[in-house]
Image (cartoon, rainbow, N blue to C red):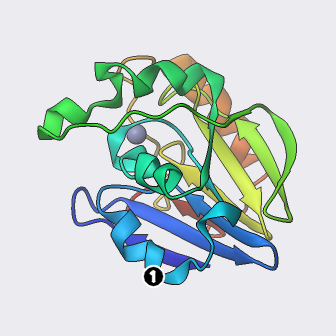
């Protein structure tokens, strides 16, 4: 697994290379240019989004344009087309895309890997955590210092967040997961 840091908000993106392709998690601002050097065949690449805020999904469109598929929870789809992706806060134009795959709680198979999807609303309605190759990816739901993402953005909900944290903390051992930002 390779970690890439965006210079925009220090958001973290991850690249997993599998025997059958590639899984990209949360490609932030400028990540396509960094990551493409490591991806031989973009048509075998799937972009998984923990949620649709610009700092996690900004470069998803660039991957899709080069042949990758994008997977996101249905409840965050509307953020792609609205101010709720928060791109305007940085004055950046968000490149819109149509998702190829809608995620829901459960198990999916992509790029030859088994991915466990846990729906964890709170930061956004469609926030998800992923378990792949014995590793958890928690986006802005659970940070590595034990904190959690803000709940005062559009679609955020504090009660949902508390429920989601309870749910996810039952399954994740401290220090064994990767979050969406440096902490
Ligand atoms: Zn976020």
Tell whether 56 sits left or right of 171. left
Which quadrant: the N terminus?
A: bottom right
Question: Does residue 159 lie above or below 165 as drawn?
Answer: above
The residue that disc 1 covers is 37
Point 27% across, 31% down: residue: 86
Residue toward you, 150 or 47: 47
Question: Does residue 67 lie above or below 5 as drawn?
Answer: above
Point 53% across, 67% down: residue: 14
Q: Quadrant of residue 25?
A: bottom right
Query: Does residue 46 appear in the picture of this structure?
Result: yes
Residue toward you, 173 or 41: 41
Badge 1 element: helix
Point 51% across, 38% down: residue: 51
Query: Does residue 182 appear in the picture of this structure?
Result: no
Residue 38 position, x and y percent, is 52, 82
Tell whether 7 sits left or right of 21. left
């Amino acid at each position: 697994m390779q970690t890439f840091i965006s210079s925009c908000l220090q958001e973290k993106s991850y690249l997993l290379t599998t025997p059958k392709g590639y899984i990209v998690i949360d490609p932030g601002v400028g990540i396509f240019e960094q990551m493409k050097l490591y991806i031989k065949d973009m048509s075998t690449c799937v972009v998984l989004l923990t949620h649709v805020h610009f700092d996690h999904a900004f470069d998803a469109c660039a991957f899709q344009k080069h042949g990758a598929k994008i997977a996101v929870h249905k409840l965050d789809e509307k953020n792609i087309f609205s101010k709720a992706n928060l791109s305007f806060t940085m004055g950046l134009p968000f490149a819109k895309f149509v998702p190829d795959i809608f995620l829901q709680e459960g198990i999916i198979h992509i790029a030859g890997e088994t991915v466990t999807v846990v729906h964890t609303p709170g930061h956004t309605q469609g926030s998800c955590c992923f378990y792949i190759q014995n590793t958890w990816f928690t986006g802005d739901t659970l940070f590595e210092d034990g904190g959690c993402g803000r709940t005062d953005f559009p679609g955020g909900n504090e009660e949902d967040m508390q429920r989601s944290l309870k749910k996810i903390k039952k399954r994740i051992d401290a220090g064994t997961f990767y979050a969406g930002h440096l902490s």
